[in-house]
Image (cartoon, grey):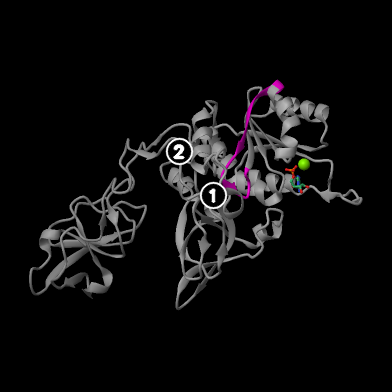
Amino acid sequence: MSKNISCQDDHDPSALTLEQAHERIAASIEPLTCAEWLFIRQALGRVLARDVRSSIDVPAHRNSAMDGYALRGEELPAAGETRLRLAGTVLAGHPFADKIAPGHCVRIMTGAPLPEELDTVVMQEHVRVEGDAIVIGSGHKPGQNVRQAGEDIRRGGVVLQRGRRLTPADIGLLASLGITEVRVSRRLRVAFFSTGDELRSLGEPLEPGQIYDSNRYTLHAMLSRLGVDIIDMGIVPDRRDAIAETLELAARDADVVVTTGGVSVGEADYIKDILARLGQVDFWKIAIKPGRPLAYGKVKQALFFGLPGNPVSAMVTFYQFLQPALHQLMGENSRKPRTLRLPTLSRLRKRPGRVEFQRGILVTDEKRGWAVQSTGNQGSHILSSMSQADCFIILPLESRGAEPGEEVTVQLFDGLV
Ligand code: AMP
Ligand code: MG
């Protein structure tokens, strides 16, 4: 059976698959070796350059998990009741100095250190106070309601691994260990510019046929979230000398140079010449939609990404290729973007031959739970579809779309940053 490639599907035998493109990029990147010390308050979102070990046990001492009475587990009654005399009260931050004789207990607060002789806490609601004694019934277990020293973290143990991007919880964890500074990889410097004679900067009037440059703003926003140093080099017209000059300048200062526009088939040829002179760049057709053309390689010693000009394509290729590459450069341990399987409420149309990143909106109702619906028009120039969306609906290479009720793969925007 012969296959009609041009009309029925989007197969292009010379295109790379999404996975091949990922692999080639990943294989070509060496993580930065430069690192710096930062106070933990400045380290949110940065990547650890070495393992962090704990120099203390956490908790540092055995302590009570609740407000109640601490006692010897062996003195709990197997049946009936036991009466213990109160020897005093232990508050958090105030260890009990005296020895506690058999037949005695102490009142204890949550987090307060357990006196050495005692090993069990009974909740205050479970005892009867009678003068300077308490009465406890049966049904309690020796050792209950006690947090052991080192139960959370052992002294000397690795708490956070090299390559971890620090979260708010990590910062708190570091503080709980008394750690004030951490060694993190240095900030990346990313330079970018837009190419296109039709582009105007904000504040300039638009002549017929001209449009405002939005990609630089989108890029600036996405890069800001990654915590990199941003070098915005503006708009460069479609002129050989101007592009060559800007590229050279960008590569001098930056670890990574990003352009948008000018890599589609019609334009690729003359940019190819420039890039061939300045570095080693491949022009890839990737079997994805949107975002098929991507230029990738090196300009001087800087990594180079030539993203497509269409605003949605630029964002898709940023999230799928540039962002993981930046993570890798920063030394971050690789992590797969999180995906979910959810039923679609919309009918999704697609031709086989490319992986599609359609824009979706998560919806929920009490009966059916979470589902996803399409934003509608999926044109790669419809930036409002990205703005409305909170996820990509990823339709695999050979898919022919999906009917309402069918499960599809969803990648949350939240998990992308
Ligand atoms: P290109 O990849 O240069 O062929 O551009 C593809 C489409 O994206 C064209 O319609 C361009 O006008 C548009 N485009 C390119 N760069 C930008 C930009 N920086 N902001 C908004 N649209 C752009
Ligand atoms: Mg262009």
Residue 255 occupies quadrant: top right
- Mark in front: 2 vs 1: 1
Image location of residue 316, percent across then percent down: 61, 48
Indicate yes or no whether the magenta region holds residue 253: no
In the image, residue 339 sits, relative to residue 345, either above or below, namely above
52 and 336: which one is in front?
336
The answer to whether the residues at label 2 and label 1 have Cβ atoms under 8 Å apart is no
Question: SS of the residue at dot 1?
Answer: loop
Q: Residue furthest front?
A: 1
- Image position of 87 with respect to 284: above or below: below
What's the distance in space between the residues labelled 2 and 1, CA to CA? 31 Å
Residue 374: give x, y in percent of width and height. 59, 65
Labels in figure, total: 2
Q: Residue at x 77, y 26 (%)?
A: 244
Residue 55, horizontal then vertical, whole percent: 36, 36
Which residue is nearer to you in this view: 199 or 34? 199
Residues in magenta?
Answer: 277-292
The local crowd at label 1, few if under 14, some if 14 to 19, many if 20 or more residues have their Cα within 10 Å, is: many
Residue beneath disc 2: 333
Q: Earlier in the sequence, mark 2 or mark 1?
A: 2
Q: Nearer the viewer, residue 99 or 416?
A: 416
Q: Identify the residue position indicated by label 1 in the image.
A: 353
In the image, residue 121 sits, relative to residue 295, either above or below, namely: below
Among all residues in the image, which is located at the extreme left? Answer: 79
- Residue 331 seen from this side: no
In this rendering, the answer to whether 404 lies above or below 121 is below
Q: Is residue 136 left or right of residue 322?
A: left
122 relative to 347 in the view: left or right: left
In the rendered structure, which amino acid carries the disc numbered 1? Answer: Gly
The residue at 89%/48% (across/down) is 204
